[in-house]
């Protein structure tokens, strides 16, 4: 959860990766990567083989629920979405982010300074290997009032790109349109991972925060993330959060565990 003052620079550049890996370890700590096949039992009756030589379940057609002001962003409406976001952030500058990723395909091997170091290396190696599928950005004001959510659908080819089969099966069941991702997905701007140590829905239930939209889609998950944030500020911090103390901290990757 972050306060955002300048999200877009006004020009879309499909080659601007914003490489967030510049300050990450270069692997000289003795760690290495070991591939995992990610195979699991097939639960559906129809399957296809992709270029990874992995059977992919073909789920029945998905019936989408109401949008709840979740805007699906594709290559065809990308510039329009950026234009709207540049206006929205003037008044709704609290932004929750969620990503959908094609699973975990590798684990780091070697010596690690701590569990946090191992977790970081796990994130790093999978970010470098995989492509993001969805990015959700949910916009709220300082009072926790929701404005809208933009769900970016990235270009992904299930017949060519690397993935863990069980994750793809889950995303298909949740309504991810893989055929359209291949045809109308946006170019990749960055590769943020999704590695939550617990269930987001479980946290929401504990705080009596209901979910809006389908689970395991970036738009719905980002909205739930923001609602949980504001509820935690209300319940545990008496409606006041010290930005100097908590800004820039990620659970599981630092001293704030």
Image (cartoon, grey):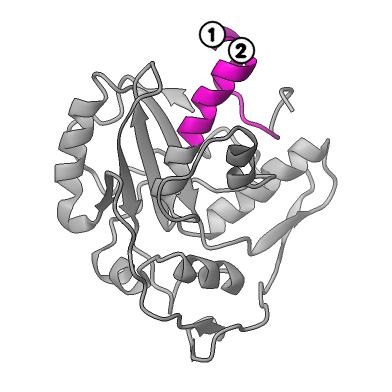
Give the magenta-colored segment's residue range: 225-252
Q: In the image, residue 216 lies at what x, y percent? A: 50, 56
Would residue 254 appear left or right of 73 to someone viewing this image?
right
Would residue 224 appear left or right of 36 to someone viewing this image?
left
Q: Which residue is mark 1?
A: 240
**196 falls in the magenta region:** no
| Residue projecting furthest to the front | 208
Residue at x 16% of width, y 57% of height: 76
Residues at marks 2 and 1, CA–CA distance in whole angstroms: 6 Å
Find numbered disc 2 in the image and state the secondary structure of the residue it sits on.
loop
Find numbered disc 1 in the image and state the secondary structure of the residue it sits on.
loop
Q: In the image, residue 28 lies at what x, y percent? A: 73, 43
79 in relation to 234, above or below: below
- Packing grade of label 1 (10 A; few <14, some 14-19, many >=20) is few
96 in relation to 66, above or below: above
Q: In the image, residue 187 lies at what x, y percent? A: 30, 55
Front in this rendered view, residue 11 or 94: 94
Q: Which residue is mark 2?
A: 237
177 in relation to 235, above or below: below
Residue 93 shows up from this direction = yes
Residue at x 37% of width, y 39% of height: 137
110 in relation to 233, above or below: below
Q: Which mark is residue 43?
A: none
Q: Quadrant of the C terminus?
A: top right
Residue at x 15% of width, y 36% of height: 83
Front in this rendered view, residue 195 or 210: 210
Q: In the image, residue 155 lies at what x, y percent? A: 33, 62
| For the residues bearing labels 2 and 1, Cβ distance under 8 angstroms | yes
Front in this rendered view, residue 228 or 154: 228
């Amino acid at each position: 959860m972050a306060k955002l003052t300048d999200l877009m620079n006004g020009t879309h550049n499909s080659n601007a990766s914003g490489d967030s890996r510049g300050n990450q370890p270069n692997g000289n700590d003795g760690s290495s990567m070991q591939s995992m096949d990610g195979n699991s039992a097939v639960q559906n009756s129809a399957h296809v083989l992709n270029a990874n030589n992995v059977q992919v379940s073909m789920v029945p057609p998905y019936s989408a629920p109401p949008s709840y002001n979740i805007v699906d962003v594709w290559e065809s409406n990308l510039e329009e979405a950026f234009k709207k976001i540049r206006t929205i952030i003037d008044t709704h500058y609290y932004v929750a982010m969620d990503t959908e990723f094609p699973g975990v395909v590798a684990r780091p091997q070697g010596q690690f300074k701590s569990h946090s170091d191992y977790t970081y290396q796990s994130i790093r190696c999978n970010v470098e290997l995989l492509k993001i599928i969805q990015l959700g950005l949910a916009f709220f004001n300082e009072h926790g009032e929701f404005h809208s959510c933009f769900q970016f659908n990235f270009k992904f080819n299930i017949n060519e790109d690397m993935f863990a089969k069980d994750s793809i099966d889950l995303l298909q069941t949740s309504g991810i349109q893989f055929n359209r991702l291949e045809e109308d997905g946006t170019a990749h701007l960055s590769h943020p991972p999704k590695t939550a140590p617990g269930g987001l829905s479980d946290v929401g239930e504990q705080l009596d925060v209901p979910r809006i939209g389908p689970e395991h889609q970036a738009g719905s998950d980002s909205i739930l993330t923001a609602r949980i944030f504001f509820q935690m500020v209300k319940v545990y911090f008496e409606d006041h959060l010290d930005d100097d103390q908590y800004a820039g901290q990620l659970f599981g990757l630092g001293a704030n565990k």
